[in-house]
């Protein structure tokens, strides 16, 4: 009489779990890395928009210069761990005008852009292309 606890093994299925694991693991790892990259992109996009808002708000205040607006952007992005970005401050669409020359009602716009390859947490992620950006506009006070 056989015991109910006897394990039945099929010699034809020997190693099947290892093969299945070897096939599924790379797909699973790529999926996880993709989730990390998409999450980092969304987080960075929000940080860029918040930095543009902070810079724009600083630039709309009376007596502030374009350098004050870019410094506000720099402060916020430094704490967020973002580097390699460019900041463009414009007054009524002109990027050559200084916000200190703006008058009440002029539109101050701050655009912060970073290449997607600069924000990756995965080493060697050279496959990312394009830019992420955040922009914000307010009227000068």
Image: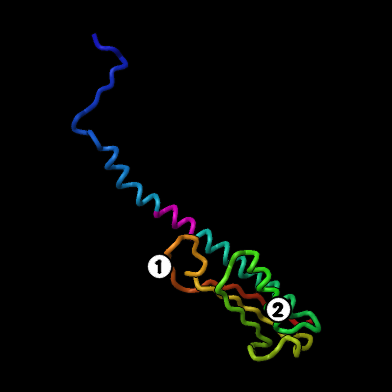
Q: Which residue is mark 2?
A: 69
Percent position (x, y) of residue 38? Answer: 49, 60
Q: Could you tell whether 140 is left or right of 25 in the image?
A: right
Tag 1 or tag 2, which sits nearer the N-term?
Answer: 2
Examine the structure image and report whether residue 61 is included in the region drawn in magenta.
no
Which residue lies under the disc numbered 1?
Answer: 127
| Coordinates of residue 137 in the picture (x, y in percent) | 68, 78
Q: In the image, what residue occupies the spot 66% across and 75% down?
A: 136
Magenta part of the protein: which range? Answer: 30-37
Residue 8 pos. (x, y %): 25, 23
The image's mark for residue 64 is: none
Front residue of 72/105: it is: 72
SS class, disc 2: helix
Labelled pair 2, 1 in contact (Cβ < 8 Å): no
**Position above or below: 74 against 98:** above
Question: At x 21% / y 28%, what residue is drawn?
Answer: 10
Tell me, yes or no, whether the highlighted magenta stretch contains residue 32. yes
How far from the left and from the top, in percent, is residue 49? 63, 70
Query: At numbered mark 1, what does the secondary structure look like: helix, strand or loop?
Result: loop
Residue at left offset 45%, top offset 62%: 123
Taking depth in this image into account, of 13 and 76 the one nearest to the observer is 76
């Amino acid at each position: 009489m056989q015991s109910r606890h006897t394990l039945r093994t099929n010699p034809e299925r020997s190693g099947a779990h290892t093969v299945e694991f070897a096939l599924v693991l790379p797909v699973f790892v790529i999926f996880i890395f993709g989730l990390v990259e998409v999450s980092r992109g969304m987080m960075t996009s929000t940080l860029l928009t918040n930095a543009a808002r902070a810079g724009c708000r600083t630039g709309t205040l009376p007596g502030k210069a374009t350098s004050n607006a870019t410094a506000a952007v720099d402060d916020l992005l430094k704490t967020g761990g973002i580097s390699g970005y460019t900041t463009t401050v414009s007054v009524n669409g002109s990027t050559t005008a200084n916000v200190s020359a703006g008058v009440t009602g002029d539109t101050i716009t701050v655009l912060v852009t970073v290449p997607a390859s600069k924000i990756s947490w995965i080493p060697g992620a050279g496959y990312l292309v394009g830019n992420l950006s955040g922009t914000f506009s307010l009227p000068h006070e």
